[in-house]
Image (cartoon, grey):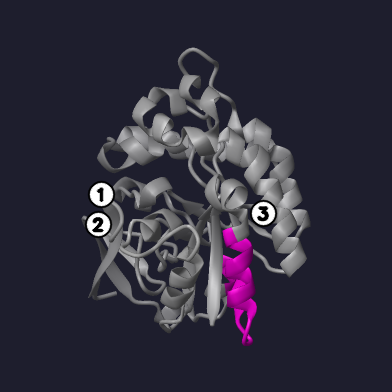
């Protein structure tokens, strides 16, 4: 059993509390993960319904970020943690600028907005310094043809923007990505908790059962710094115990790509759909197309 971990950081609280918690846990289990850092501002207060739903995991102050309170600068806050992640052997990727803006606007944005966002994201990363990021990922698995066009192998080794079953080169509205995509294959904990019979006490068993279905390149699990990193940290520990048992492996996303001859990767259309446990339309790996 092979499971690659992507850790999404979507808020100031997740950055300050969830990331250090997960780094300590991963160090204890001697596993690598891909940490996805946003480099813009936490504008949770500008999406009040989303912020209200997430108030327990982000903190009550998040309701006012970008409105009554100044929006925290996640890039500045996260610079030391990016270095710490690398020093601890983890892989670092980018999670856009503002997670809230990218989640709600990206799929319907105009090309100029996306181009400027990508330019600002890269500029913010250069200000932090260090080696090039491994990947670009998007909140809530949102994507846009113009974003695929912005993906340069000189900047990113791969992307992680869709739900699917195996690595591939994405194609959307005629635009072909120049970097391979590593899709998320497993349900999130929140999606699984909305299934019949699943509770906080047994959700790890259901997630483990899903991960036992063999896939050619193994599975990808999307952990949240706000969920698995704080209130559900014991769940993350249980999953690591189960995944590492019986000669299983837990790894970073890039470790999965290193095993693959990229010249043999298929091209697939990107479509839109929903997964069980979510009412959000997400980018999905669809039918294969000629290379």
Span highlighted in magenta in the image: 235-255
Judge whether residue 260 can be spotted in this image: yes
Q: Residue furthest top?
A: 68
Residue 215 is tagged as: none
Q: Which residue is mark 1?
A: 279
Q: Quadrant of the C terminus?
A: bottom left
Q: Quadrant of residue 37?
A: top right
| Relative vertical location of residue 54 with respect to residue 68 in this rendering, above or below | below
- Residue assigned mark 3: 22
**Structural crowding at the residue carrying mark 1, measured as other residues with C-alpha within 10 Å and reported as few (<14), some (14–19) or many (≥20):** few
Label 2 sits on residue: 274
Q: Residue at x 39, y 77 (%)?
A: 265
Q: Contact (CB < 8 A) between labels 1 and 2?
A: yes
Residue at 50% over, 61% down: 201
Asked if the magenta segment contains residue 263, the reply would be no
Q: Residue at x 51, y 30 (%)?
A: 42
Question: In the rendered structure, which disc, 3 or 1, sits on the residue that comes first in sequence?
Answer: 3
Q: Secondary structure at mark 2?
A: loop
């Amino acid at each position: 059993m092979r499971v690659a971990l992507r850790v999404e950081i979507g808020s100031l609280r997740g950055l300050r509390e969830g990331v250090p918690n997960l780094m300590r846990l991963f160090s204890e289990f001697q596993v690598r993960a891909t940490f996805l850092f946003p480099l813009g501002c936490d504008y949770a207060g500008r999406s009040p319904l989303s912020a209200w739903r997430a108030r327990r995991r982000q903190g009550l102050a998040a309701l006012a970020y970008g409105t009554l309170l100044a929006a925290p600068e996640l890039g500045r806050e996260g610079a030391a943690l990016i270095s710490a992640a690398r020093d601890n052997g983890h892989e670092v990727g980018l999670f856009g600028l503002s997670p809230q803006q990218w989640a709600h606007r990206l799929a319907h944005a105009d090309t100029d907005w996306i181009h400027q966002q990508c330019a600002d994201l890269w500029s913010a990363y250069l200000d932090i310094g260090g080696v090039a990021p491994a990947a670009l990922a998007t909140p809530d698995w949102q994507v846009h043809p113009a974003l695929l066009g912005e993906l340069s192998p000189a900047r990113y080794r791969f992307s992680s923007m869709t739900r699917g079953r195996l690595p591939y080169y994405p194609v959307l509205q005629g635009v072909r990505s120049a970097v391979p995509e590593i899709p998320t294959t497993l349900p999130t904990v929140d999606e699984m908790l909305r299934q019949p019979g699943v509770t906080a006490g047994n959700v790890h068993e259901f997630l483990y059962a899903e991960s036992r279905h063999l896939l050619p390149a193994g599975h990808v699990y999307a952990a949240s710094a706000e969920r698995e990193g704080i209130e559900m940290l014991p769940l993350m520990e249980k999953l690591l115990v189960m995944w590492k048992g019986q000669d299983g492996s837990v790894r970073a996303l890039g470790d999965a790509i290193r095993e693959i001859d990229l010249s043999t990767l298929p091209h697939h259309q990107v479509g839109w759909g929903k997964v069980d446990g979510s009412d959000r339309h997400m980018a999905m790996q669809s039918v294969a197309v000629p290379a």
